[in-house]
Image (cartoon, rainbow, N blue to C red):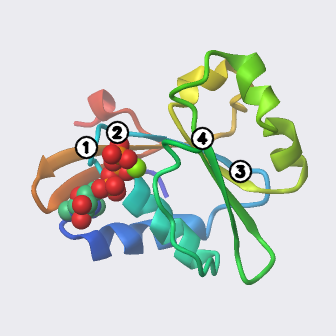
């Protein structure tokens, strides 16, 4: 899937994420962008649910990286790179190990990872529209939307 999708509730964002999750493979990097409260964690919860993760998915803001194991043996790794300073920092938290383990890597503040982001990474950008509505851009830049 690719394009811009409007969701009008948390449930709709979860459902969109679950649909998107069908395309994820071990080693897929998902760059996740959006302002505070845009719904990044909510979207990640939908991915986690699709992968059969039982534990609670919260923002990795304070711990930088959170690992969630799915009941089918898949691994969802959720990173917030905001407080890292560059590729060396990103490597130091185990970037390559996670990919080698076949994790799905959901990355907030992906610009910190520079050239470590593979060319086939997926891009999800969330925009706040109103209290209950969000626009979710999947592999499309918001300014390229007509
Ligand atoms: N359509 C929607 N999709 C997602 N979240 C929604 C929607 N409508 C309302 N919300 C609310 O918006 C908030 C989204 O918060 P969430 O933690 O997912 O954002 P975030 O982008 O991770 O923020 P932060 O940068 O603070 O971590 C939640 O309180 C959620 O209930
Ligand atoms: Mg969050």
Residue denoted by label 3 = 28
Separation of marks 3 and 1 at Cα, in angstroms: 23 Å
Q: Residue at x 18, y 67 (%)?
A: 8
Separation of marks 4 and 1 at Cα, in angstroms: 23 Å
Frontmost of labels 3 and 2 is 2
Q: Secondary structure at mark 4?
A: loop
Pick the front one: 10 or 16: 10
Q: Residue at x 21, y 70 (%)?
A: 9
The mark found on residue 127 in the picture is 1
Residue denoted by label 4 = 64
Do callouts 1 and 2 mark residues in contact (Cβ within 8 Å)? yes
Q: Which of marks 2 and 4 precedes in the sequence?
A: 2
Q: Residue at x 81, y 76 (%)?
A: 73
Residue 2 visible within the image: yes
Residue 93 as seen in the image, left or right of residue 141: right
Pick the front one: 125 or 42: 42
Q: Secondary structure at mark 1?
A: strand
Count neighbours of disc 4 (C-alpha within 10 A) and say few if under 14, some if 14 to 19, many if 20 or more.
some
Q: Position of residue 39 (x, y in %)?
A: 32, 54
Frontmost of labels 4 and 1 is 4
Do callouts 3 and 2 mark residues in contact (Cβ within 8 Å)? no
Q: Secondary structure at mark 3?
A: loop
The residue carrying mark 3 has its beta carbon less than 8 Å from ligand 2: no
The mark found on residue 34 in the picture is 2
The residue carrying mark 2 has its beta carbon less than 8 Å from ligand 1: yes
Do callouts 4 and 3 mark residues in contact (Cβ within 8 Å)? no
Q: Secondary structure at mark 2?
A: loop
Q: Which of marks 3 and 4 precedes in the sequence?
A: 3
Q: Position of residue 38 (x, y in %)?
A: 28, 48
Separation of marks 3 and 2 at Cα, in angstroms: 19 Å
């Amino acid at each position: 899937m690719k394009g811009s999708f409007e969701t009008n509730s948390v449930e709709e964002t979860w459902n969109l994420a679950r649909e998107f999750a069908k395309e994820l493979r071990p080693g897929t990097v998902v760059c996740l962008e959006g302002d505070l409260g845009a719904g990044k964690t909510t979207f990640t919860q939908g991915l986690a649910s699709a992968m059969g993760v039982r534990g609670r998915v919260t923002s990795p803001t304070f711990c930088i990286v959170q690992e969630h194991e799915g009941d089918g043996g898949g691994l969802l790794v959720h990173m917030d790179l905001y407080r890292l300073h560059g590729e060396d920092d990103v490597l130091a938290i185990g970037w390559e190990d996670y990919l080698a383990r076949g994790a799905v890597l959901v990355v907030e503040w992906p610009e910190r990872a520079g050239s470590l982001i593979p060319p086939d990474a997926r891009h999800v950008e969330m925009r706040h529209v109103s209290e209950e509505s969000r626009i979710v851009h999947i592999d499309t830049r918001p300014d390229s939307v007509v």
